[in-house]
Every structure is written in structure tokens, then in C-alpha cells.
Amino acid sequence: MKSARDYYLDENYNCAEATIRGANDSLGLGLSGEAMKLLSGCGGGMSSGMTCGVLCGCVAALGSMLTEEKGHLSPRLKPGVSGFVKLFAETFGATDCRDLQPVYKRDGIRCAILVEQAQELFNKYVEENGFAK
């Protein structure tokens, strides 16, 4: 089983791709490689510095776990996502890539620290809220 950090650093996936792959492995989501490609455009704040790709990957993983058939017909989805977004912002100080990069980006490892810490935070959040499959 690989961590999000492993995917990020060793296999050169972007932050969003690494996050969903790490969640898929650690939480047994059963997502296909094709499904995980859906996050490829979210890296680097959707290539625009906006919403952090790591956060996008976590939200996608929550969607996989909490959506029954459709989002608006899944009562645990909205509070589950909003709760994690709030926790992410409180923990890391922001939700946008442009605000997080100056704090977390390092030469040679890019945002590996954030990727790793967010996976730990996410897995704990999922466990504490009973969201695991």
C-alpha cells in the first residue's frame, strides 16, 4: 500500500492525483485508475492557484464514500464535505493553493509535507466520523 506522499514524490503524480490514490489505497475505496484520472486537472489549484488539489482529492474521496446515488440525495455528503473543508482550513490556514504554497512548498519535494499531513488528517476525519467503507 502506498501513501499519497509516495505517489506524489516517487511516481510524480500531482497533488490531487496523489491524494486520491493514497485515499484509495489507505481506505480501500476500490476506485479504478480511470476514475482517479478525473482528478488530474485539479493539481496546482486547478492550474490556477485556486482550491488546493489536495483538498479536491479529499473531497472526491468523500464523494466516493458518502454518495449513495446522487449528491443531493445523500444526506451525509454535504455535512461530511463541509466539515472536512472547515477542518482543512483550520489546520493548514487556507484552502487555496496560492495561499498554501508559500507555507508548504519546498525545493525538491514540492508540497509533499502538505500532501502527507492532509492524508493523515483525512484518514483520521474519516475514521472519527464513521465514513470508512
Image (cartoon, rainbow, N blue to C red):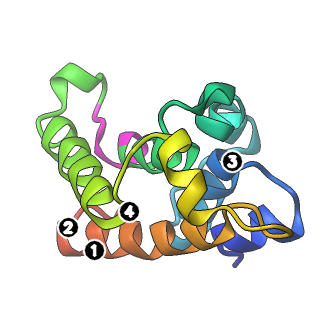
Residue type (three-letter) at the residue carrying disc 2: Gly
> Marks 3 and 1: which is nearer the front?
3
Q: Earlier in the sequence, mark 3 or mark 2?
A: 3
Badge nearest the viewer, 3 or 4 = 4
66 in magenta: yes
**First-in-chain label (3 vs 4):** 3
Q: Residues within 10 Å of mark 3 (few under 14, many from 20)?
A: many
- Residue 99 falls left or right of residue 35: left
Q: Secondary structure at mark 1?
A: helix
Q: CA distance from mark 1 to mark 4?
A: 20 Å
CB of mark 2 within 8 Å of CB of mark 1?
yes
**Label of residue 36 in the image:** none
> Mark 3 and mark 1: span between their CA atoms?
22 Å
Residue at image x 82%, y 67%? 107
Where is mark 4, residue-wise?
92
Kind of residue sitting beneath label 4: Phe
Q: Which residue is mark 3?
A: 17
Rendering coords of residue 30 (x, y %): 57, 54
Name the residue carrying label 2: 130
Q: Secondary structure at mark 2?
A: loop
Coordinates of residue 48 in the picture (x, y in percent): 63, 25
- The numbered mark at residue 127 is 1
At 49% across and 74% down in the image, what residue appears? Answer: 117
The stretch in magenta equals 63-68
